Amino acid sequence: MGVDLPIVDVAGVSRARRHPDWLKAPIAAGESVRDLRQLLRGLNLNTVCEEARCPNLGECWDQRTATVMILGDVCTRACGFCAIATGRPTWFDPDEPRRVAEAVAAMGLEHVVVTSVARDDLPDGGASVFAATITELRARCPGMGVEVLIPDFNGDAAALRSVMVAGPDILNHNVETVERLQQPVRKRARYDRSLAVLAQAKANALELGREAYTKSSIMVGLGEERDELLTTFRDLRAVDCDILTVGQYLRPTAEHLPLVRYYHPDEFAELGREARAMGFRHVESGPLVRSSYHARDQVPDADLRARRRAATVGPDGRVAPGPDGRVAPGPAA
């Protein structure tokens, strides 16, 4: 059913292979893609869509959705699966939260995802910038869904609490893979610490008297076993994680971790059924699924989704103007 890899030649080098047909994604082209790229470039903003070479960029940008990446485009960690540049960051701009909110207001989104590179060079890992960005988004785009995909802040409880005080609707932190493969895949991250981040986020939300969903993502195809995946699902439910995404790992370059196996769409469907049976409130499981894929549709509260869409989309189906009266052309996010 799935496709096992790799085929190795006599020199010990994996041969180049075509992806299976079910992994074909739309090409990133069209008016909406050009408009969104121009808007983000004009405000000097990065997107993880481009930096991480996401295969869904064409589909998402054509629908005028994007995951904004704050705190620069150089990461302090060298994870074995990730295409984002690694090094010593020098970039920091205290005005970035305002510019992010300005871009999002211009797009008229009903749900936005904000993520970042890991910034272990900063005392709080960048948590204060996440908090400031959420605050700016709330001020400019009241009623819009705000999701943050955060690093682990090196387990700093005060840093995470500052993000939760700002009031995200969804706190997303990815375990990425099963416990056995954490070290080669995630380098400086730890499985138990990631579970603790998700648990603390829920505890903070309860303490602050507001509802916040938690979310995590897993890649498959790195050599994990099925039982290990199911154990990871159970571990996430044990810390009351609400939303799970499961997608296929695709090797960005020859320098990254090798791809061991392609999973068939039927296997993703079965993993999705298993996860839902464990009590996740929403599960996305498919070959091209990534952490932020269809993020606006992952909010478990259907009534809340409908209210947000009504607030951001006019009766003609076009994006409603933002609070500043600006609106980018194109279909609703």
Image (spheres, rainbow, N blue to C red):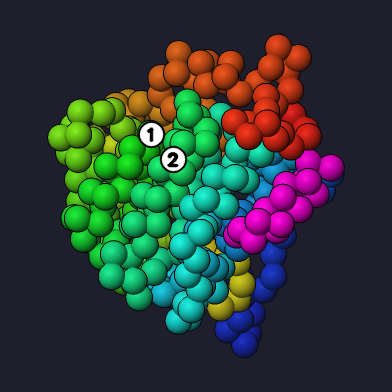
The residue range painted magenta reads 31-46
**Mark 1 residue type:** Asp
Circle 2 crowding by C-alpha within 10 Å: few under 14, some 14–19, many from 20: many
Q: Secondary structure at mark 2?
A: strand
- The quadrant the N terminus occupies is top right
Which residue is denoted by mark 1 in the rendering? 169
Q: Residues within 10 Å of mark 1 (few under 14, many from 20)?
A: many
Q: Which mark is residue 147?
A: 2
For residue 12, say whether it is visible.
yes
Image coordinates of residue 22 in percent, x first then y, are 67, 43
Answer yes or no: is residue 274 visible. no
Closest to the observer: 74 or 94?
A: 94
Q: Amino acid at mark 2?
A: Glu
| Distance between the alpha carbons at the discs numbered 1 and 2 | 6 Å
The x and y percentages for residue 173 are 36, 50
Q: Is residue 39 found inside the magenta-colored segment of the image?
A: yes
Mark with earlier residue (1, 2)? 2
Contact between marks 1 and 2 (CB within 8 A): the answer is yes
Write down the quadrant of residue 124 in the picture.
Answer: bottom left
Looking at the picture, how far across and down is residue 225, in whole percent? 36, 53
Tell whether position 146 is magenta. Answer: no
Q: Is 246 displayed left or right of 319 in the figure?
A: left
